Each structure stands twice: as C-alpha cells, then as structure tokens.
Amino acid sequence: MLLAGFATQAHSGQAEGEGPPTPPPVPSCAWCAGPPPPPTLVPTAAPTVVKSASAAKAGAAGYVFGVTISPRQVRRGRSVKVAITAPKGERLVIAVTYWRRKPTFFKGTLDHDPPYVKIVKVPAAAPTGKGTIKVRFFTFSGSTGAKPISVPFTVLK
C-alpha cells in the first residue's frame, strides 16, 4: 500500500510513456539568439628589421631598431624616458621637437647592450600640445644605418 502511493507521486507530473520535458522555444529576437561568433583574427605587423651598414660588414642578418617612450603624456617640467633598441656600436641623434619651438638635439653612441635609455626633461616653458621624438641612426662610417623613427607624445599643463 505504501509502495503504490509512492509510485503515484513519482508519475503524477507526467503521463505514462512521455520522455523528458521539451526545452522552451527559441526566441526570435536578435539580442537573445545566443553567444556572439568568435572574434576574427587580424594579422599584426612584424617588428621592423633593418640591415645596418655595420651589421653588413660583420655579416649579421639584421637588427631590430626600436624606440619606446614613457609616459606618452607628460606635464611641463617633468621627464620622458626614451628607450632605444639598436645594435651595439651604432651612433644616434635624438631630436625632441615641440610644435612651436626649435628642436633640441642629443647625440649618443650605443656602447653597451640594448636598450639605450635617455631621460629627456620637458622644459617648463614648453608649449602644450603635440611633440615628437625623432631618432636617427648612424654607423661609424657615417652612412645612415636605418630610417629615422618618430614617436609622438603630448605635453600637458
């Protein structure tokens, strides 16, 4: 008797011979149609590999020339850190240009392993707005080692 009552409770929600309940209908609106498709892969550019004249004499395949600055937005009177990656022995000229001033030049030689780090102070009288740090590379023979690299930055109040 007790077993018969248990059996009726177990099957009271469904009729005999029915399977599991059906899932709810799929909505017809666009925003609830499911997860978005996976993102498409975009090819990225490879780092610039330039064959230096000094590297050509040494028989090397090529070197990566790179310039990074931090921070990209700097207040007047503060400093910008310029990190330069180039082969050892390259000579370089750093030109710091503001939109309303003559450029300031710094010369140097990469006499140690990269990166070459130069701290450039932004003058208190520098105009606010866009500025550019342009780096030119030279070899000991005087020929241009690579194309100049320009990196923009912003001067704030």
Image: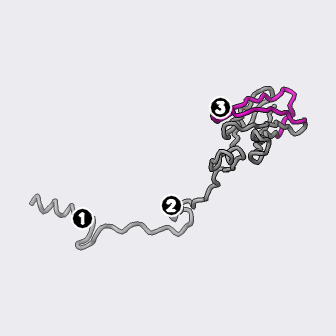
Residue situated in front as seen by the camera: 126 or 29 = 126
- Mark 3 crowd level (few <14, some 14–19, many ≥20, 10 Å Cα): few
Mark 1 against mark 2, which lies toward the viewer?
A: 2
Of the image marks 3 and 2, the number of the one nearer the N terminus: 2
Callouts 1 and 2 close, C-beta under 8 Å:
no
Amino acid on which disc 2 is placed: Pro
Of the image marks 1 and 2, the number of the one nearer the N terminus: 1
- Mark 2 crowd level (few <14, some 14–19, many ≥20, 10 Å Cα): few
Identify the image quadrant of the C terminus.
Answer: top right
Instruction: Give the residues drawn in magenta, as a range.
Output: 101-130
Residue corresponding to mark 2: 35
Residue corresponding to mark 3: 112
Callouts 3 and 2 close, C-beta under 8 Å:
no
Q: Does 157 sit left or right of 54 as displayed? A: right
Marks 3/2: CA distance? 52 Å
**SS at circle 3:** loop
Q: Position of residue 50 (x, y in %)?
A: 69, 50
Q: Position of residue 38 (x, y in %)?
A: 53, 60
Q: Position of residue 52 (x, y in %)?
A: 70, 47
Amino acid on which disc 1 is placed: Ser
Q: Residue furthest bottom?
A: 17
Q: Residue at x 82, y 36 (%)?
A: 96
Mark 3 against mark 2, which lies toward the viewer?
A: 3
Q: Residue at x 76, y 30 (%)?
A: 120
Q: Residue at x 28, y 70 (%)?
A: 19
Callouts 1 and 3 close, C-beta under 8 Å:
no
Residue corresponding to mark 1: 12
Q: Is residue 6 placed above or below 155 in the rendered structure?
A: below
